[in-house]
């Protein structure tokens, strides 16, 4: 169930407590939908496309952004225009997936898209870009590396991101391998480095999945997942872990934008507000009714206090050991 926008209420206050940072996520489809690949991203009229194959969502987004950049309308491009243009681009190529925006805050979807934090002109721009083709495995993909290269080029040329502040994971034998451990570690390092005023962009292109929810926080009974290259031995990365390691620990004042180009990605970051490309503009972004803030606040408390607790336990055990030794 969803409630429409309005003045800040108890829901909004809980959202700010549970998620200190401003987080926006663009996904290529609803949780129940699959996300398509395209054999030639050149059909989306990208400048200097890296390779031919790629994800339909990434290509549709970049087509919209580059079009706006070329005609000078990028600074005023609204969220609703972005999503609906992506939807049109996808439909024109024969794809029926519906892009959507989820967020940590109630935002006006008719206001401009923002990838760079305007609260601090000197803030650092960081990115984690992940492309997994699952080389040599069943279900091998062909365009996820190209997606990362195309997104990296856009962020560098249009928004001024520096390569030294970008972490790239690809199963190409050259970049950091996108294993479960390396993906999680990249997100945790990103959180540790980020400061108020910084801008963060995360891009994932690969397989996404769904597994049975064991914590009881999903209305549909499923957790959405990212599928690392070593999923057969290490398992999938569920949305609860993404929230714990990436979303919740980001400090207030950081702006993070994520693009998740994978199947079942609609709510993979567990954010409390939603607007879809086929949504009602007059209703705007909507609160997801029944959102479990209590569990999210508990996760935040554990993340915040666990290091101090471990430190205290270390001191306690040290004292006990000293007494016994005495």
Image (cartoon, rainbow, N blue to C red):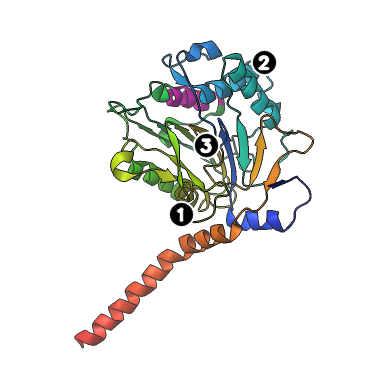
Q: Residue furthest bottom?
A: 326
* Residue 67 forms part of the magenta stretch: no
Vertical placement of residue 302 versus 123, above or below: below
Which structural element holds mark 1? loop
- In x, y percent, where is residue 118? 64, 39
Q: Earlier in the sequence, mark 1 or mark 2?
A: 2
**Residue 168: which disc?**
none
Where are the magenta residues, as a range? 147-158
Looking at the rendered image, the disc whose residue lies closer to the viewer, 1 or 2, is 1
- Residue under pointer 3: 265
Which structural element holds mark 3? loop
* Quarter location, residue 290: bottom right
Q: Main secondary structure of the magenta part?
A: helix
* Residue 151 forms part of the magenta stretch: yes
Q: Earlier in the sequence, mark 3 or mark 2?
A: 2
3D distance between C-alphas at marks 3 and 2: 31 Å
- Identity of the residue drawn at 25% across and 83% down: 322
- Identity of the residue drawn at 41% across and 44% down: 237
Vertical placement of residue 97 versus 216, above or below: above
Task: Say whether marks 3 and 1 touch (CB < 8 Å).
Answer: no
Q: Is residue 219 visible?
A: yes
Residue closest to the eye, 44 or 221: 221
Residue closest to the eye, 166 or 142: 142
3D distance between C-alphas at marks 3 and 1: 18 Å
- In x, y percent, where is residue 325? 20, 85
- Residue under pointer 2: 71
- Identity of the residue drawn at 57% across and 16% down: 94
- Residue under pointer 1: 214
Quick check: 154 left or right of 318? right
Q: Earlier in the sequence, mark 3 or mark 1?
A: 1
């Amino acid at each position: 169930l969803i409630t429409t926008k309005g003045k800040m209420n108890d829901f909004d206050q809980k959202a700010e407590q549970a998620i200190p940072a401003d987080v926006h996520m663009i996904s290529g489809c609803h949780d129940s939908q699959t996300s398509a690949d395209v054999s030639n991203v050149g059909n989306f009229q990208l400048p200097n496309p890296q390779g031919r194959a790629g994800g339909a969502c990434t290509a549709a987004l970049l087509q919209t952004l580059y079009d706006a950049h070329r005609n000078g309308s990028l600074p005023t491009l609204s969220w609703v225009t972005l999503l609906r243009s992506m939807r049109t681009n996808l439909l024109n190529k024969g794809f029926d997936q519906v892009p959507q925006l989820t967020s940590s805050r109630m935002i006006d979807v008719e206001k401009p898209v923002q990838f760079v934090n305007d609260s601090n002109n000197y803030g650092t721009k960081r990115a984690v870009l992940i492309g997994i083709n699952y080389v040599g495995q069943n279900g091998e993909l062909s365009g996820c590396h190209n997606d990362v290269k195309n997104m990296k080029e856009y962020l560098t040329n249009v928004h001024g991101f520096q390569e030294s502040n970008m972490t790239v994971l690809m199963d190409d034998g050259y970049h950091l391998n996108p294993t479960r451990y390396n993906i999680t570690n990249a997100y945790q390092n990103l959180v540790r480095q980020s400061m108020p005023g910084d801008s963060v962009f995360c891009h994932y292109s690969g397989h996404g999945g769904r597994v049975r929810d064991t914590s009881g926080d999903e209305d549909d009974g499923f957790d959405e997942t990212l599928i690392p290259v070593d999923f057969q031995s290490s398992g999938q990365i569920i949305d609860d872990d993404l929230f714990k390691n990436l979303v919740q620990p980001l400090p207030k004042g950081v702006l993070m934008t994520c693009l998740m180009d994978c199947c079942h990605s609609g709510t993979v970051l567990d954010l409390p507000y939603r607007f879809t490309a086929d949504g009602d503009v007059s209703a705007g972004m909507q609160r997801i009714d029944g959102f479990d803030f209590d569990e999210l606040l508990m996760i935040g408390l554990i993340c915040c206090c666990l290091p101090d607790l471990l430190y205290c336990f270390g001191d306690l055990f040290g004292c006990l050991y000293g007494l016994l030794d005495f």
